[in-house]
Structure formats: C-alpha cells, structure tokens
C-alpha cells in the first residue's frame, strides 16, 4: 500500500515537472496531457488513502479498561473493538496487575482469542478494598496481538483506577 502511495507521488511530481517544461516550450497539448495525469494521479492517491483507512477500520483493536457492572466488585475488561478476531500474544507492562484470586492479569490473557466487538472480564478487587490498594493497579505498556491471518498489531495501554474511586 505504501509503495503505491510513493509511486503515485513520484508520478505526480514527474507530471508537474513535465507541465512546467511544456509551459517553457509553449506546447499546450503536452501541458493539458501532463495536467490530466496529475489530476488522475491525485484521484488515485485519494482512492489509495480511502482503501487504507477502510482496511485500518477492519483490524482488531484491543482496549483494557475497568468495569463496574457487578455491584461491590471492580472488574477489568479486555475488549476487541475491531472487526476481526484478535489473538493476544504478549504484553510488556511496567506493573503486573493481580486479580482478586491472586493470578496475574497479563498472564491470564496471553493466548486469548477475542471475537470482534466482544470482551472478556476478570474480577479485579472488592470495592471495600479500593482505598488501600488502588495504587497497585496502575500499569502502562504495550499489548501485542494478531488477527486470524497472522498479521501483527500492537497498542499502547494504560490502566489506571486511582481517580475513579468506589461508585
């Protein structure tokens, strides 16, 4: 995709130079031809950019966020907001988050398959423990995952519940 964009930009540049040259030698037919190539190339470049934007919208996109859907328990959710299946490969974070049962959250999600627009939720802590332990649940880093075809993606993640408080 990027190669097509680079080639199109080179074609636009060459055609623009040809247009300038046609003005220099007073050749109107060459000027019209080169300007039409510039116009067609710009249209092609826009089409390439639209195709790339549509392809980016179809990719999996992993988000990690707190979840308050159960009364008295704070949860942590892994959500796939993309339109393809996401397979989590690994994560590199500065602080490992412990779940309510003592397991490490990022170890639990390694290898997990998350369908499009779906989420997986884990119990994080009881709300009555929030005031004494909320600072232990701040983590930032990168999560690595792939789609079903093996194309690899990564997102920066930040999980922080310090300012949320028990609601």
Image (tube, rainbow, N blue to C red):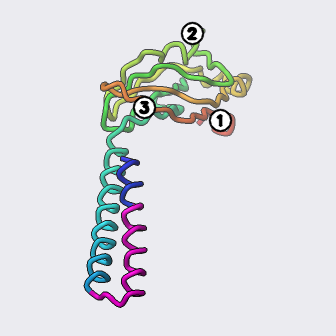
Give the percent coordinates (x, y) of residue 113.
36, 20
Q: Secondary structure at mark 2?
A: loop
Callouts 1 and 2 close, C-beta under 8 Å = no
Residue position marked by numbered label 2 in the rendering: 103
What are the residue bounds of the magenta stretch? 9-28
The quarter of the picture where the C terminus appears is: top right
Of the two numbered discs 3 and 1 on the same chain, state the one appearing first in sequence: 3
Callouts 3 and 1 close, C-beta under 8 Å = no
Give the percent coordinates (x, y) of residue 121.
45, 23
Q: Is residue 30 above or below residue 154?
A: below
Residue 114's quadrant in the figure? top left
Q: Residues within 10 Å of mark 1 (few under 14, many from 20)?
A: few
Q: Which mark is residue 165?
A: 1
**Depth check: 34 or 49 in front?**
34
Furthest toward the bottom, the residue is 26
Q: Is residue 4 above or below residue 99?
A: below
Q: Label 3 to label 2, Cα distance in Å?
A: 19 Å
Give the percent coordinates (x, y) of residue 20.
42, 81
Q: Residues within 10 Å of mark 2 (few under 14, many from 20)?
A: few
Q: Is residue 124 left or right of residue 121?
A: right
Q: Secondary structure at mark 1?
A: loop
Q: Is residue 34 left or right of residue 109?
A: left
Q: Is residue 163 above or below residue 108?
A: below
Residue 70 visible in this rendered orientation of the protein: no
The residue at 61%/15% (across/down) is: 98
Q: Residues within 10 Å of mark 3 (few under 14, many from 20)?
A: many
Q: Secondary structure at mark 3?
A: strand
Residue position marked by numbered label 3 in the rendering: 79
| For discs 3 and 1, the disc positioned in front in the rendered view | 3
**Depth check: 73 or 43 in front?**
43
Q: Is residue 64 left or right of residue 119?
A: right
Give the percent coordinates (x, y) of residue 25.
38, 87
């Amino acid at each position: 995709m990027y190669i097509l964009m680079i080639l199109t930009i080179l074609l636009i540049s060459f055609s623009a130079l040809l247009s300038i040259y046609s003005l220099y030698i007073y050749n109107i037919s060459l000027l019209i031809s080169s300007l039409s190539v510039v116009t067609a190339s710009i249209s092609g470049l826009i089409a390439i950019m639209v195709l790339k934007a549509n392809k980016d919208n179809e990719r999996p996109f992993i988000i990690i966020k707190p979840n308050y859907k159960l009364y008295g328990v704070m949860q942590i959710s892994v959500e796939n907001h993309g339109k393809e299946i996401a397979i989590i490969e690994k994560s590199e974070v500065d602080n490992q988050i412990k779940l309510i049962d003592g397991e490490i959250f990022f170890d639990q999600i390694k290898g997990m398959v998350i369908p499009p627009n779906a989420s997986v939720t884990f119990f994080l802590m009881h709300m009555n423990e929030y005031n004494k332990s909320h600072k232990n649940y701040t983590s930032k880093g990168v999560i690595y995952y792939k789609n079903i075809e093996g194309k690899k993606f990564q997102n920066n993640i930040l999980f922080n519940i310090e300012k949320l408080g028990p609601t």
